Image: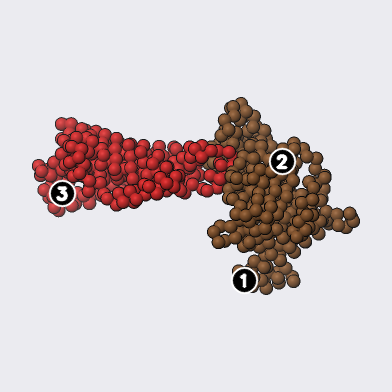
Amino acid sequence: MAEAMKGIEKETVENAVAVTTVAAPTRTEPTAGRGAALRVEQAGISFGDFRAVQGIDLDIPAGEFLCLLGPSGCGKSTLLSAMAGFIEVSEGSLTADGAPVRGPDPELGMVFQSSEVLFDWMTVHQNVTFGPRMRGVSRAEQNRVADEFLGLVGLRHCADRYPGQLSGGMRQRVQIARVLANEPGVVLMDEPFGALDAQTRQVLQQETARIWEASGCTVVFVTHDIDEAILLADRVAVMTAGPAASIKSLYTVDLPRPRDESDPAALRLRNKLREDIGEEVRKAMRDQGLDDQLDREAKGA
Amino acid sequence: MTITTTEAPARTRTRPRRTKGRGGGQALRTIGLYVFAVLVGLGVWQLLAMKYGPSLVASPSQTLSAARELAADGTLGNSVIASSRRILIGWGLGVVVGAPVGLLIGQIRIVRLLLEPYTEFFRFIPPVAFVTLAVVWLGIGESSKVVLIFYTAVFIVTLNTSAGVMAVNESKLRAAASLGASRSQILRRVVLPSTVPYILTGARLAMGNSFLTIVSAEIVAAQVGLGSLIWTSRNYGRIDWVFVGIITLGILGLVYDRILRVIAMRVLRRYGAAV
């Protein structure tokens, strides 16, 4: 591959064969190897007459970190909800390690954007051990799990506190630990750092990369933040503006980790992603009858 | 007469509040304002009593001596115990039945659809409307009164609980399911704890309404009780006894509500930001 093109590979969705042949990035040794592969084929999700997403094809190999990137309201979260089994696909198929996703499953962990999903009446320790406790594992095992995963997110000292006593960033760490404590094959993350301040977000992004590499699970990460996607992803799937959103393009981010934002290849990728998304945002604004003149001026077009 | 003697301690209370200043004085200031408000009320009461005479309005001092008289022969104590007993049993049953029913209504669609016509219908019929039926059906014993209080309490608790269940954050339920909790585990471990604040609110409202109901429940054929005290006093033309009954009812309600509030605060602190 030419040096200038290093790190960027664009595949259009029409080129479906190429999409499926993308192997897991060679640079990562499959560490723990407990990731599960997700496969989405011609999936569409409708609510009554409203078609949220359609024609989604994604083949996510075990252990991959995939970012779903798109303008707000494009159906990224809807697609993620389907992957978590919260809603069913109306057409096409969605399988995890070959088995159709039929409902919520501890194998498919979900980290939500809002930390309101923590159980306020339980301590951090009780939150993190919720999954194992529901399976009826022994108290000793629960303590081991809490110790391991609170250690992983650096919150061992907060085990006896209640979520209400923690900051937003710490609450998201608890959420991540709680999901990982179930040792899921796939971790789905729905803009988990969207509500955090810039510094906290940056720290948590780095930690996410570290934890993902240590755990070896498959991650699907929804975001509208281009830099976040470049920092974390093996591949970035850009979605078109909704309704009836689909995957517009897929990029492979073949850059060394830990990622360096000032890497020229990263900068080039960012511009491409920005172009792709900008197009969709403008399209969405036109569809909503909004004038995109100001937007274009602001971009210096 | 009584007023001048009660004013004296109040003054000593208000004075340190002014000298002490901002910090710790806040609580004293609150108490001072309460005392002041009560004193003004007593003053107005005294003026009304002086204007209309003892046959219409018993003065504070007359009420106090009537209370002593009723307390001495045991009537007051027995009335308080009898009414409290009815309220606590009826209200307690109302909470014990109302909370689980509310949980089921909120959680299971079929139960909701089956019971909603009844909850929506009966909550508009005040307990007073059932006094006659209760006596005819259940006799003049304790059960008719307890059932009326129960009727008062159970709908409030049920409606509050089911509202609480339906207000549980949908993502919380999804998170629990995604972490591997079964339906019944979600109900016990997530829905119930999230609903506790609503159940407590329902219980408090129900307690207030039980006090509204107790008087009408005791209108008919009750030997003892604050409601019956108020009603029989009318027959003897003892306005001062009526005043004693009313004021005792108010104080009792206040005490019960305070106790519930303290318990609620304790519990809510644990259930934290759920509200």
Place residue B105 in its image quadrant: top left
Image mark 3: chain: B
Could you tell me if residue A210 is visible in this image?
A: no
Q: Classify the position of the N terminus of chain B by image quarter.
A: top left
Secondary structure of the residue carrying numbered label 2: loop
Q: Chain B rendered in what hue?
A: red
How crowded pointer 2 is (Cα within 10 Å; few <14, some 14-19, many 20+) is rated as: many
Image mark 1: chain: A
Q: Gap between marks 1 and 3, in whole Å? A: 72 Å
Q: Gap between marks 2 and 1, in whole Å? A: 43 Å
The residue at the far right in this view is A2
Q: Nearer the viewer, residue A270 or B130?
A: B130
- Residue at 29% x, 40% y: name it: B150
* Vertical placement of residue A198 versus B180, above or below: below
Q: Gap between marks 3 and 2, in whole Å? A: 82 Å
Q: Earlier in the sequence, mark 2 or mark 1?
A: 2
Name which residue type carries label 2.
Answer: Gly
Kindly identify which residue carries mark 1.
A290
Kindly identify which residue carries mark 3.
B57
Place residue A50 in its image quadrant: bottom right
- Residue at 36% x, 47% y: name it: B115
- Residue at 64% x, 66% y: name it: A284
